[in-house]
Image: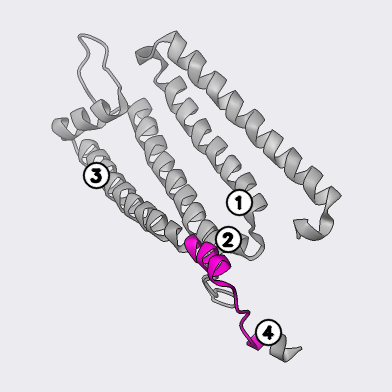
Amino acid sequence: MSDQHTTPIKLGPLPALIFASRWLQLPLYLGLILAQCVYVYHFGVELFHLIEAAMGSEHALELLTQGMGYKFDPGTEPKLTEAIIMLAVLSLIDVVMISNLLIMVIVGGYETFVSRMHLRGHPDEPEWLGHVNASVLKVKLGTAIIGISSIHLLRSFINAPNLQDRVLIAQTVIHVAFLLSAIAIAYCDKLINSTYPSEGH
């Protein structure tokens, strides 16, 4: 029994080539890590603008509102309001949630489709990684996308005076589509696990 675990299985040339092709995904995950770095930089810039605007910088306030698409009413003095702070914080939360989604794809995807990372027993091992597979990853990604879409929709509703009605309607319809898609994926996963319980685990 021990020889079965210690002796590596020898593959033929073609199966070995096909199996090794999974490493072609490595540059993709490395690219997502670079995208994560861009999001960290964007988060820092937005946070810096928010802090500067809170300290009275008109230039930082202008950059902050331009980035969010917020427009002051004509004739009013530009100042940091609760609505602007809320929009800025939601933008930061949006970046964090997308960053979480990236980590989930990078770590979970690499562990599932490329190679084991041997994190079992590591004190910083993500709790969700212990039972992740392709099916669970799809459900978690669907849930994360719904959360991101919810943040975008909330930002749009707060900034509704600066948006057209058709934009709000379109975003609402898209959010509902995401929600229905995630429910459908979760339901299909439940059906598969109930039909093939051994494969579901």
The residue tagged 1 is: 137
Front-lying residue, 164 or 25: 25
Q: Report the residue marked by disc 2.
A: 112
Q: Are marks 1 and 2 in contact (CB under 8 Å)?
A: yes
Q: What residue type is labelled 4?
A: His
Left or right, 51 with respect to 136, comes to: left
Residue numbers of the magenta segment: 6-22
Marks 4 and 3, how far apart in space?
51 Å
What kind of residue is marked 3? Val
In the rendered view, would you say 181 is above or below 43?
above
Q: Which amino acid does label 1 sit on?
A: Leu
Element type where label 1 sits in the image: helix
Residue that badge 4 annotates: 5
Q: Distance between the residues labelled 2 and 4?
A: 20 Å
Residue placed furthest toward the front? 13
- Residue 161 horizontal side relative to residue 128, left or right: left
Q: Is mark 4 on a helix, strand or loop?
A: helix
**Mark-to-mark CA distance, 4 and 1:** 27 Å
Q: Quadrant for residue 91, please give it.
A: top left
Q: How far apart are marks 3 and 1 (CA)?
A: 31 Å
* SS type, badge 3: helix
The residue tagged 3 is 45
Residue at 66% of width from left, 29% of height from top?
A: 180
User: What amino acid is at disc 2?
Assistant: Thr
